[in-house]
Image (spheres, rainbow, N blue to C red):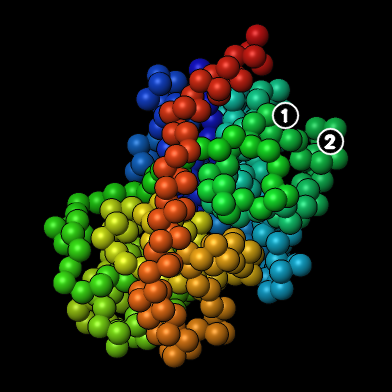
Amino acid sequence: MKFLFVPGGSPATVFGLVPLARALRDAGHEVLMASTKDMMPVVTGTGIPGIAVTPHDIWHYITKDREGNLKEIPEDLPRQGPFVGRWFAQMGADGLPVLRDISRSWRPDLVVGGSMSYAAPLLAAHLDVPYVRQAWDTDDSNAQDRGAELELQPELAELGLSRLPEPDLRIEICPPSLTPPEAPPAQLMRWLPGNLQRELEPWTLTRGDRRRVCVTAGSRASKERTFDFLRALAQNIAPLDVEIVIPAPEALAVELRSALPGIRTGWIPLDVLAPTCDLVVHHAGGATTMTTMNAGLPQLIIPEAVVFDAPARRIADYGAALTLQPAEATPERVASAVSELLTNPSYTERARELSQEIARLPLPSHMVGPLEKLAAQRRG
């Protein structure tokens, strides 16, 4: 059978879908992942065949509308949720014609889309094949879906639809203790890391003499967006006599090494590093959050956008994290929060409970049979 995967145009969204794609590929099926041109090295680097469906990167859709006009990015939650949905939808609409063209010669039996991969349900409806929606993080995307439906009115009208098609199957990866009560029914699946790897150095495999704190802004971190954030965090935490490690894209790591002599930084695979750490301080990115929970580590979460507040708050309310808004992240507040998380064992205990919940969920390989059955039903 043929399975088409559609991520969301960033490394984290690719990484989130890779374990299920690998499971289907390992079962002997043909798998293809379609994304933006700049994501092709990321897709193929994970071992999944990839094809580009739009030349634009994610920032094009965040900052420009369909006519190329600059957008104003809202900062309040009531507007930011739909705004995020609209630019994800715009990216999906831009890639849809290419996806349709590809499907004329490589027709999928089933389409798997990430949480906000809105081209996936549209393509599945066009082809009359099953559509599976797989979450790539713990976020609730209801507000984003509403914004997407507004953006996709032309594409929906072409299909004779007024709303986004419901998936034939929802797959969620959120630990049950963190699942919002209003979440729709879904099949739970164990989260596994899908991130890119690199040659390791021996120190990444073992704990050092001091407590190790990982500070990261994720796979999309850059000098323009996150250099000041990461440098400030490292400087604020350094007086606590801890070892600081900063996983970051290599271009940013060069700048960090210059500003923070002696710091360990670079593309350090977070799934390998996390088990050797005592704490992760981060921006609330989905892949970083899931990797940290999987490793059973407490977190200090400083959300880079208000749409990340709710999932971060659920982890904090469970007792496995503390959160600070960017405006609250003064040197004193950051140092105090890090000290609290490192010295109060309750945070680690609760974090380990979440890790155990994740480990008890069905592996991606267990989803192969249900997806085969779903694809065969529509085939027949």
Q: Which residue in the protein does label 1 denote?
A: 125
Tell me where residue 228 appears, x and y as whole percent. 42, 81
Which residue is nearer to you in this view: 227 or 271?
271
Q: Which residue in the protein does label 2 denote?
A: 161
Whole-number angstrom distance, CA of label 1 to CA of label 2: 10 Å
Tell me where residue 51 appears, x and y as whole percent. 48, 37
From the viewer's perspective, tell me whether residue 375 is left or right of residue 235. right
Q: Determine the secondary structure under disc 2.
A: loop
Crowding at label 2, few (<14), some or many (≥20) Cα neighbours within 10 Å? some
Q: Of marks 1 and 2, which one's residue comes earlier in the chain?
A: 1
The C terminus lies in quadrant: top right
From the viewer's perspective, tell me whether residue 230 is left or right of residue 207. right
- The residue sitting at 47% across, 27% down in the picture is 366
Which residue is nearer to you in this view: 235 or 177?
177
Give the vertical position of 362 relative to 154 (above or below). Answer: above
Residue 159 bears which disc, if any?
A: none
Q: Determine the secondary structure under disc 1.
A: helix
- The residue sitting at 71% across, 42% down in the picture is 184
- The residue sitting at 70% across, 51% down in the picture is 181
Which residue is nearer to you in this view: 49 or 282?
282
Q: In this rendering, does residue 38 appear at all?
A: no
Give the vertical position of 234 relative to 107 (above or below). Answer: below
